[in-house]
Image (tube, rainbow, N blue to C red):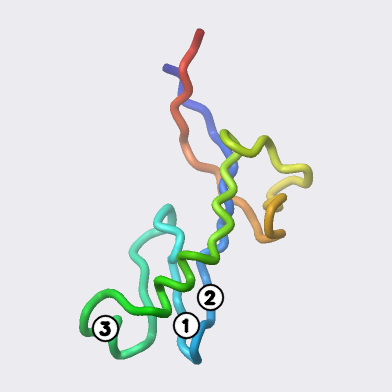
Amino acid sequence: MKLELMHVCAKDFFQIGGYVQTKVNSLSGKESCTCKGFRTHHRCKHMDKAKSMICGYHEANDGPPIRKNVCPKCGSGTILVKYCTEVS
């Protein structure tokens, strides 16, 4: 196994239904939404919709970004994450 740094999409901020959803992409921490339902149940329809809008770019699956630190799928920034690859 070899540990490499790879780019993933960093978009984790959305505004849906008049509320703000943050850290939707679980790579960046604990998710939240400003609606009352999320504060009570730790889940809401706004977060579900935000999660469906994540582009899912990962360098291991989609290839390296064309422009440095720019997601080739949605144009948001990218972050580097540690990723294990098999060595043949």
Q: Position of residue 42 (x, y in %)?
A: 25, 75
x, y (%) of residue 5? Answer: 54, 34
Q: Which residue is mark 1?
A: 20
Residue placed under numbered mark 2 in the picture: 14
Identify the residue under disc 3. 39
Mark 1 in CB contact with mark 2 (< 8 angstroms): yes
> Which badge, 1 or 3, comes first in the chain's sequence?
1
Q: Residues within 10 Å of mark 2 (few under 14, many from 20)?
A: many
Residue 23 vs 86, above or below: the answer is: below
Marks 1 and 2, how far apart at CA: 6 Å
Numbered-mark total: 3
Front-most of residues 17 and 2: 17
Query: How far apart are labels 2 and 3 at the CA level?
Result: 17 Å
Q: Residue flagged by tag 3: what amino acid is it?
A: Arg
Element on which disc 2 rests: strand
Q: CA distance from mark 1 to mark 3?
A: 12 Å
Depth check, front residue: 10 or 58:
58
The crowding category of the residue bearing disc 3, from other C-alpha atoms within 10 Å (few below 14, some 14 to 19, many at least 20), is few
With respect to residue 10, does 62 lie above or below? above
Q: How far across and down, in percent of the image, does residue 37 sit?
A: 28, 86
Q: Nearer the viewer, residue 85 or 55?
A: 55
The three-letter amino acid code for the residue at tag 2 is Phe
Task: Report the residue at 59% width, 42% height from top.
Answer: 7
Q: Residue furthest right?
A: 67
71 relative to 24 in the view: left or right: right
- Per the image, label 1 sits on a secondary structure element best described as strand
Helix, strand or loop status at disc 3: helix
Which residue occupies 49% across, 12% down? 87
Q: Residue at x 51, y 83 (%)?
A: 16
